[in-house]
Image (cartoon, grey):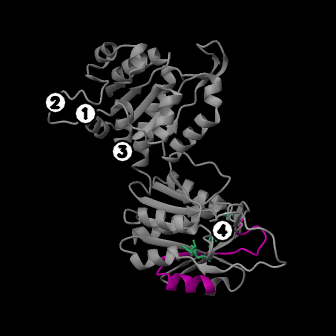
Amino acid sequence: MEKKKVLLAVSGGIAAYKAATVASKLYQSGYEVKVILTNSAQKFITPLTFQTLTRQEVYTDTFEEKEPAIVSHIDIADWADLVLIAPATANVIGKLANGIADDMLSTTLLATKADVIIAPAMNVNMFNHPAVQKNMKTLSSFGWRFIEPNEGLLACGWIGKGRLAEPEELIEAVHDYFNEITNQKTLPLSGKKILVTAGPTREELDPVRYFTNHSSGKMGYALASVAKQLGADVTLVTGPTAIDSPEGIKVEKVTSAKEMFDQTLFHYAEQDVVIKCAAVADYTPVTVHENKFKKKNDTWTVELRKTDDILQTLGEKKEHQILVGFAAETENLENYATDKLRRKNLDMVVGNDVSKEGSGFGSDTNEIVIIKKDGSISKLPILTKEKAAKEILQQVLEMMEQ
Ligand code: PMT
């Protein structure tokens, strides 16, 4: 069998010494291992250690191009099946979250299309700092995964969370990753790209006020998670919600209907399926005040103009994609939903009566009706949003098979 290729990226913390064991055990487990060391990592451990353990050249400098025909950081970015950053310092996490590319590690990570696992290690207060937490959230939203540091006595003398996970845990995470990839290849949606939109949009009126709606994002996030479990490569375009980004899913965070339009259209061409579950504002203020609008008269009339209908635009540009829309109604559910299916050139529409108890906005459950373009209608009982998502994706799968 062809060897799996792991790129081990080591940054400069005291735990860098553990990376030598990781490199050695990965090599002994049958992986092909290449190593990048940052300048700071080399203060703790030498390239020769890794070269000896992996039988491979070690990369330390973007500008040290040994072979004229090859640009090294692009070459190893393309070579890797998986990148493991261990230990990942606060500095490296910050650089990667902000697209900074100023050394071999960061330029390679910016160029790679491989999946990335990050094992942070640092002082407990640095780990808990809002800046580091925010940067880790950003990296999670790229679909990158984390192996949480362990708690205990840290090299700096503090006790708390910050110790690099043990080499055995890191090796296990790499094995698990490749097992998951192998299993995913046999899942029903493996190899398929699905884009889901979720949550509300916010339409700004002035720096302190906006129009929005009651969407919590629960239905859309459930669809994204179930699609991922079924093996799909999922992109979630989400308006503001209180839900954490699901693991292993690319998340594009947007605020306004315009931003959701741009992000969805940006990813559209490469998708096999698009499910538009977001509650997009139909209207947006004509004037957005630069400063807070001061209270004056008894009434305030705000002029609104229609937003671009994202789903309608996707329907007009549809090529190979299966397009699924939602219809949030308070009356004539089936008629209005069928009208949206036809008008927006959809393959399927999911109707929900948002005036019903336990259905629609905010609840953990939903009562849906699925209408397909062949005219078939499935009315489902009230279900958890996860179960409703499974039903929707089951119908999508059937459409794909047809
Ligand atoms: O997020 P939750 O709290 O879990 O609630 C779930 C939900 C009620 C938001 C969800 O089940 C739902 O019904 N989503 C669609 C809400 C909606 O905007 O429905 P609509 O009937 O107004 O729009 C019809 C379709 O057009 C939707 O797929 C919508 O995403 C799309 N649309 C609407 C306006 C616009 N400018 N662009 C669009 O793409």
Is residue 1 in view from this perspective?
Answer: no
* Residue 12 figure quarter: top left
Mark 2: which secondary structure? loop
Going from N to C along the chain, the mark reached first, 4 or 1, is 1
The response on whether ligand 1 sits within 8 Å of label 4 is: no
Give the number of the disc on residue 289. Answer: 4
Percent coordinates x, y for residue 227 in the rendering: 51, 57
From mark 2 to mark 4, how far is it between C-alphas?
57 Å
From mark 3 to mark 1, how far is it between C-alphas?
15 Å
Q: Quadrant of ligand 1?
A: bottom right
Q: Please state the extent of the stretch shown in magenta in the rendering.
A: 336-361
Residue 277 belongs to magenta span: no
Residue 322, above or below 187 = below
At 50% from the left edge and 85% from the top edge, which residue is drawn?
Answer: 342
Residue placed most toward the observer, 52 or 14: 14
Q: Evaluate if marks 2 and 1 touch, with contact meaning CB atoms under 8 Å apart.
A: yes
> According to the image, label 1 marks what residue?
72
Which quadrant holds the N terminus? top left
Q: Evaluate if marks 4 and 1 touch, with contact meaning CB atoms under 8 Å apart.
A: no
Going from N to C along the chain, the mark reached first, 2 or 1, is 2
Going from N to C along the chain, the mark reached first, 2 or 4, is 2
> According to the image, label 3 marks what residue?
113
